Amino acid sequence: MAEVESLPVAAAADLKALVDPIIIDARDPNEVEGCKGGPKIDGSINVPFNVDGQKQSDRPTTAAEFEEKLEAAGCLPADKTAAIVTHCGSGGRGGKSCNVIKGLGYTNVHNGGSPDNIRAARA
């Protein structure tokens, strides 16, 4: 079971330039409620990267497991060039989410880091 590699947080200018991106929040539901990394971004879709809330250090999520979650959420567009931003509380799982989505053939996917980072970049 290969661990998914995390991609770096995108530059603020790259995030600001995106037009109407789909925002995928990879935090666990309790982290969304607790505002880890900032309050939820309006319109974002919560697809937790962790399996059953277990930390990546305890139970790494596979690409196939996250692909199943994305499919169940129905959040990925048919257009593989659509702008997508992933995030978690600081960027680790957001980067892993970004990597999995790129692996599905999407070409305009960016790790936004945290909600607060995305808000600051797109202000």
Image (cartoon, rainbow, N blue to C red):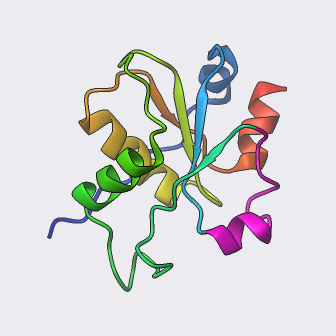
Relative to 119, is 32 above or below? below
Q: Is residue 95 above or below residue 12?
A: below
Q: Is 94 drawn above or below residue 53 in the view shown? A: above
Residue 21: % across, % down: 61, 24
Quarter the N terminus occupies? bottom left
Observer-nearest of 74 and 65 = 74
The reply, left or right, for residue 63 in relation to residue 12 is left
- Please say if 27 is above or below 113: below
Query: Which residue: 62% across, 17% down?
Result: 18
Quadrant location of the C terminus in the rendered image? top right
Relative horizontal placement of residue 87, taking residue 104 as reference (left or right): right
Q: Residue at x 31, y 50 (%)?
A: 67
Q: Nearer the viewer, residue 46 or 8?
A: 46
In percent of width and height, residue 12 lies at 67, 29
| Residue furthest bottom in the image | 58
Q: What is the span of residues highlighted in magenta in the rendered image?
A: 29-42
Nearer to me, 78 or 59: 78
Q: Position of residue 6 (x, y in %)?
A: 38, 53
Which percent across, then down, holds residue 112?
Answer: 60, 40
Residue drawn at 47 percent across, 48 percent down: 73
Q: Residue furthest left?
A: 1
Magenta stretch: helix, strand or loop mostly: loop
Instruction: Place residue 69 in its image quadrant.
Output: bottom left
**Drawn side of residue 68 relative to residue 118, left or right:** left
Q: Is residue 25 magenta?
A: no
Q: Is residue 32 magenta?
A: yes
Counting labels gives: 0
Q: In this rendered view, identify the residue nearer to me: 47 or 103.
A: 47
Please give the name of the residue rendered at 40% of the width and 73% of the height, measured from the top-left corner: 51
